[in-house]
Image (tube, helix red, strand yellow):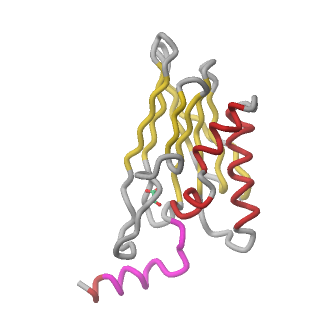
Amino acid sequence: MEREWEKWEDKHKGMFDPVLRNHDTIGLLAMDKEGNIAGGVSTSGWANKMPGRVGDSPIIGAALYVDNEVGAACATGLGENVIKTAGSFLVVEKMREGYSPLEACKIAVNRLKKIHSKEKNHQVAYIALNKNGEHAGYSYKNGFEYAVVTNNSSQLIQAAFLNK
Ligand code: ASP
């Protein structure tokens, strides 16, 4: 078992990023016809994580936050960074202040840039939805996509990003 872990660790050296390690939290934000908002996240966890590690998905305000008066946000990527910035809560609070979903997601990603200026090799991405049904996604690094499904359409959107 330990040998397997060492082999795996060797293969993934330098890949601190759970997305590069092929893991990804699935986040869903939904609005019903009355305009009520709900959300959920389901994490893949993180293969070969430290024993006892708690990711961002079970922590309210980290990988998910929903306030039916304002909107909702969820995150994927390196959970430690999302937790340290109370990321989804931050996005929703920024929408409460009047920022658009895209602006709010950008603020949360930029907060990461400030606290992790030396650590470039990680990914965090947010999606957000407000009470007007406006939505956005924004990621730290390139390559994040999110899907938008309505009664009449379904599309995959390439999110804007901060760093290549
Ligand atoms: N956010 C998850 C975590 O850090 C990783 C993932 O995106 O699955 O636990």
Q: Is residue 86 magenta?
A: no
Residue 33, x across and y down, in percent: 47, 11
Asked whether 86 or 25 is in front, the reply is 86
Look at 64% across and 34% down and name the residue there.
136
Look at 67% across and 72% down and name the residue there.
119
The mark total stands at: 0
The quadrant holding residue 151 is top left
In the picture, which quadrant includes the C terminus?
bottom right
Residue 48, x across and y down, in percent: 35, 73
The quadrant holding residue 112 is bottom right
Asked whether 45 or 52 is in front, the reply is 52
Asked whether, in this view, residue 37 is left or right of residue 128, the answer is left
Q: Is residue 16 magenta?
A: yes
In the picture, which quadrant includes the N terminus?
bottom left
The quadrant holding residue 11 is bottom left
Numbered range of the magenta stretch? 5-17
Quarter of the rendered image showing ligand 1: bottom left
List the single residue furthest toward the left.
1
Asked whether, in this view, residue 114 is left or right of residue 60, the answer is right
Location of residue 74 with respect to 80 vertically, above or below: above
Residue 77, x across and y down, in percent: 53, 57
Location of residue 109 with respect to 72 vertically, above or below: below
Asked whether 160 or 36 is in front, the reply is 36
Residue 36, x across and y down, in percent: 49, 19
Look at 65% across and 45% down and name the residue there.
90
Asked whether, in this view, residue 120 is left or right of residue 84, the answer is right
Look at 39% across and 76% down and name the residue there.
50
